[in-house]
Image (cartoon, rainbow, N blue to C red):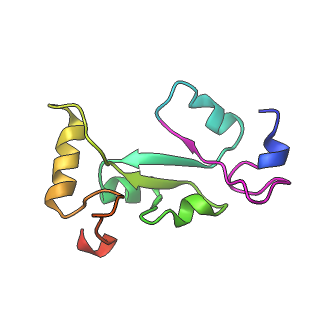
Amino acid sequence: MARLDEIGNGHEPGTLLNVVPTASWGGSEDHLIAEHDLRSARVVFSQDEARALGLDIDHDDSHAMAHGDDFALLLHGSQPPDTAAARAAKELRDGGFRGYGPARRPLGVL
């Protein structure tokens, strides 16, 4: 990670103050998150899971736009059928969550 001094680690800025990197869990290089103390986002299946992990849910990109702590995103988008993710997505939809697009609902709805 040769350019961390320039882009920062997401928790704190580097010399380029308008760059706010965020790593995401679930890829092939997850070990780099801890290795370089990168700020990260984790997709969770429920608000309860986010609470258990001690993560705020970023419903409006405010966490993503500012340097700070790790955060969560609620599961969104289509999921493979007959999986835990598909069941969780259905529960979220049944509770009123419509994702992060124009049809989204505020957190208070859930």
Q: Quadrant of the N terminus?
A: top right
Residue occupying the point 53% across, 24% down: 28
Q: Position of residue 32 (x, y in %)?
A: 65, 32
103 sits left or right of 12 in the view: left
- The residue lying toward the viewer, choosing from 97 and 18, is 18
Residue furthest toward the bottom?
108
When the figure is inspected, residue 51 is found, relative to residue 9, above or below; the finding is below
57 sits left or right of 75 in the view: right
Q: Position of residue 108 (x, y in %)?
A: 29, 75
When the figure is inspected, residue 5 is found, relative to residue 63, above or below; the finding is above
Q: Residue 13 colored magenta?
A: yes
Q: Position of residue 25 (x, y in %)?
A: 50, 38
Residue occupying the point 67% across, 54% down: 20
Q: Residue 5 colored magenta?
A: no
When the figure is inspected, residue 91 is found, relative to residue 32, above or below; the finding is below
What is the magenta segment's predominant secondary structure?
A: loop
Q: Which stretch appears magenta?
A: 8-25
Which quarter of the figure has residue 68? Answer: bottom right
When the figure is inspected, residue 43 is found, relative to residue 84, above or below; the finding is below
Residue occupying the point 28% across, 69% down: 105
